[in-house]
């Protein structure tokens, strides 16, 4: 596991201290607690060619919220899409749903800028596969595979 976390640092994918959580199947940053008693941290997931960073908040009464999503290309570490949210209840399905919307919008904009039509059915199929991978496959193994594939690690 340490080797997979070192890949984040070695390739500049994340600038935070991360640890793997088997329960959430994600890499989690060290959190901090605000003066109001709310805790904030990041959750990071890997899928085919992308890194999904989730901004998570846990209210002092215990409810978890998704405060934002940023999606980066692994190969060149560029931001593909991001969105901030307010009072959006956290679950991996919420992350998957909103990440799909962000990626679909990015694909639509890219196709439109080239004067092409996006094949929505195929795009949805591929995104479902990629995002299911991010949520369900062992993130430690995915990080190693994707780093080897895109970064030559």
Image: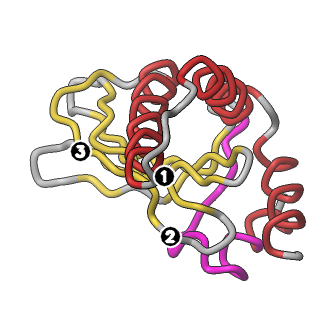
Residue 18 position within the rendered picture, expressed as x and y whole percent measured from the top left: 60, 62
Q: Is residue 133 shown left or right of residue 38?
A: right
Q: Is residue 28 magenta?
A: no
Please provide percent x and percent y for residue 81: 40, 52
Which structural element holds mark 3? strand
As drawn, 121 above or below 37 = above
Q: Residue at x 48, y 34 (%)?
A: 117
**Which residue is found at the position 27% from the left and 41% from the top?**
67
Nearer-the-camera pick, 91 or 146: 146
Contact, CB < 8 Å: mark 2 with mark 3? no
The residue pinned by badge 1 equals 71
Which residue occupies 46% across, 57% down? 80
Mark closest to the chain's N terminus, 3 or 1: 1
> Mark 2 = which residue?
78
* Quarter of the rendering containing residue 90: top left
Q: CA distance from mark 2 to mark 3?
A: 18 Å
SS label for mark 2: loop
Q: CA distance from mark 3 to mark 1?
A: 12 Å
Q: Position of residue 91 (x, y in %)?
A: 45, 21
Is 67 located above or below residue 81 in the figure? above
Residue 84's disc number: 3
Q: Which residues are magenta?
A: 7-22
Q: Earlier in the sequence, mark 2 or mark 3?
A: 2
Q: Is residue 60 shown above or below 12?
A: above
Residue drawn at x 21%, y 24% as measured from the top left: 61
Q: Is residue 64 left or right of residue 26?
A: left
Q: Nearer the viewer, residue 76 or 104?
A: 104
Q: Quadrant of the C terminus?
A: bottom right
Quarter of the image for the N terminus: give it.
Answer: bottom right
* Residue 116 falls left or right of residue 47: left
- Residue 19 belongs to the span the image colors magenta: yes
Q: Residue furthest front?
A: 115
């Amino acid at each position: 596991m340490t080797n997979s976390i070192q890949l984040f640092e070695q390739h500049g994918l994340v600038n935070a201290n991360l640890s793997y959580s088997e329960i959430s199947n994600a890499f989690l940053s060290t959190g901090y607690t605000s003066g109001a008693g709310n805790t904030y941290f990041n959750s990071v997931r890997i899928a085919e060619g992308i890194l999904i960073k989730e901004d998570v908040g846990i209210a002092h009464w215990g409810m978890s919220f998704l405060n934002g999503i940023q999606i980066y290309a692994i190969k060149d570490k560029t931001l593909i899409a991001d969105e901030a949210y307010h009072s959006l209840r956290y679950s991996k399905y919420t992350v998957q749903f909103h990440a799909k919307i962000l990626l679909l919008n990015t694909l639509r904009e890219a196709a439109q800028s080239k004067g092409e039509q996006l094949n929505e059915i195929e795009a949805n199929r591929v995104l479902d596969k990629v995002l299911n991978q991010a949520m369900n496959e062992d993130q430690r193994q995915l990080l190693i595979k994707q780093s080897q594939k895109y970064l030559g690690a």
